[in-house]
Amino acid sequence: MQLPKSLQAFLQEAGNLAAFTGRFFREAFRPRYEWREFIRQCFIIGYKSLPLIGVTGFIMGLVLTMQLRPSLVDYGVEAQLPAMVSLAIIREIGPVITALIFAGKIGSSIGAELGSMKVTEQIDAMEVSGTNPFKYLVVTRVAAATLMLPVLVILSDAISIYGGYLGVNIKANTSWSLFIMQVFDILDFSDVIPAVVKTFFFGFAVGIIGCYKGYNSKKGTEGVGASANTAVVLSSLVVFIIDLLAVQVTDLLGLN
Amino acid sequence: MAKDTGNNIKLGVFVIAGLLLLVTGLYIIGKNHSLFGAKFELKARFSNVSGLVPGNNVRFSGIQAGTVKSLEIINDTTIEVVFLIDKKTRDYIRKNAIVSIGTEGLMGNKVVNIYPGKGEAEMAEEGDMLAVKPIADMEDAMETLYTTNDNVRRISEQLLNTMERINSSPALWGLLEDSTLPVHLRVSLVNIRKASNDISGAAADLDEMVKGVAQGEGVAGLLLKDTSAKRSLSTAILNIQNASAEAGQLVTRLDKMVMDIESGRDSSMAGLILGDTSVVGSINRSLSNIETGTASFSENMEALKHNFLFRGYFRKKEKNK
């Protein structure tokens, strides 16, 4: 039986990605480790993304608060605004929005960087010189993305909640201590921990897809652009798919 | 290399800040759920926990004091709830404290309330079983509310009916819209006040009169109070009775006499005079003659007084007077 070409291509891509991921795990846990490069990547991927993530997080918190406010006022539960905003940010909006911004910034940069290295045959050169390009380029980036996104999400959540506090204070008046007390009063471990755990998967997905697309970039400058583009698109889509799976898993575990 | 070190420091600050935030957040959440700090356990048995779950807050007189640790079904009508209470609240919870399950707000989470019991009791200790107060069930409350609503509906219907009748009554509105009414009413009130003053004056007079009567003053007093008057009165009445009986007889006799005269049976002088009309004429003439005779006689007597034979006698008589 002959499968449609598009389906064949999709399955081939999925198989290649799975193989790439398998190779990542094989290489990642085998010494020697590229610590210096890993730290450098952490700095680039994590620290340098903070301003962007911080600004978007702050705006999200502020806007979400101002958007939720009229509905809550209609129901006479304006006092629940801090609780609602913090729940929305911690459970869903913080991780997902941060992961999407991260996919846009880091997924594309990894895809473009590795893609250009691929098309300029730097990766081949590296292999010749005795350095394991997969370990040096892919493992460090994927590990850095996996570990830095959760940190970014936590910082972004904190900034968003501060934005929410300012949002509440635009129309009403509440003290910082009361606001924080209301936020933490509603939060439970089951809100924070699954949300943080899924960001590791988001980070891993963004890193691995960026690396895969870049590492397998086709020849020519056009290929670099294409790999950067598809890295962003695919990793954004995968972020949502992981989010969907995560909510199912937390539901099954009774954490919702 | 120096640049690398600087970057690593920034990265370290970035990662540590993130981790600190996470740990602090988790610690605050844990603290809110009483996961840290010294605790002691208390128990209570309910027949219905109304959806209480482990982790729900426990409040002592409204202050956060701990959380629900576990719920266990003991038998078909008993559920044992174990609470974790902060040690610092321990000094205030006595053995006679009362536990009830309530709700945070109208629709919020369930919450366990511990209230101090009345009277003296020892301090509660680890694992003590506290008394419970039956839950104010939402369904009961709704049922009561339903009854109240029904009553309100009925009352409002009746009120509506009454108001409609009042509104459709032209007499009442006429009365209400009559602008002279207040003036008349005021005048009437003044009159009533005057009348009541008069009545009170009259009553005072009457009172005085009654007092006088009681003391035997006046005719009424005499009648009512004098015992001898009663006897005299009865004698008088008896006399009146006799007199009236005699008067009756007299009338009968007079009646008979008149009848006799009319029928001409009476031959006495009176009967003759009254019965014969010609006699009356004769009498009238005779009387006229007598009158003329006496006038002449009186003239003769006057002439005689002036006669010299008799003048001395009359003078002597006047002197003797």
Image (cartoon, coloured by chain):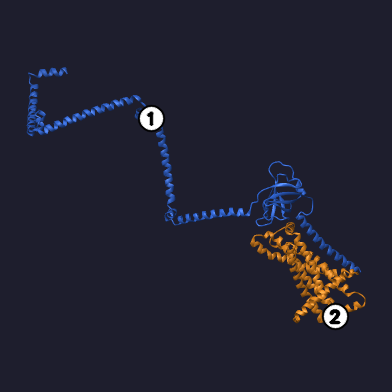
Chain colours: A orange, B blue
Q: Nearer the viewer, residue A83 or A241?
A: A241
Q: Which residue is mark 2?
A: A119
Q: CA distance from mark 1 to mark 2?
A: 144 Å
Q: x, y (%) of residue B293?
A: 7, 27
Q: x, y (%) of residue B170?
A: 42, 56
Q: Which residue is mark 1?
A: B213
Q: Chain of mark 1?
A: B
Q: Residue at x 21, y 30 (%)?
A: B248
Q: Residue at x 42, y 42 (%)?
A: B194
Q: Disc 2 on helix, strand or loop?
A: helix
Give the amino acid type for the residue marked by disc 2 in the picture: Val
Relative to B4, B118 lies left or right:
left
Q: Chain of mark 2?
A: A
Outermost residue, right direction?
A129
**Res B302 label:** none
The quadrant of the image that shows the C terminus of chain B is top left
Q: Residues within 10 Å of mark 2 (few under 14, many from 20)?
A: many
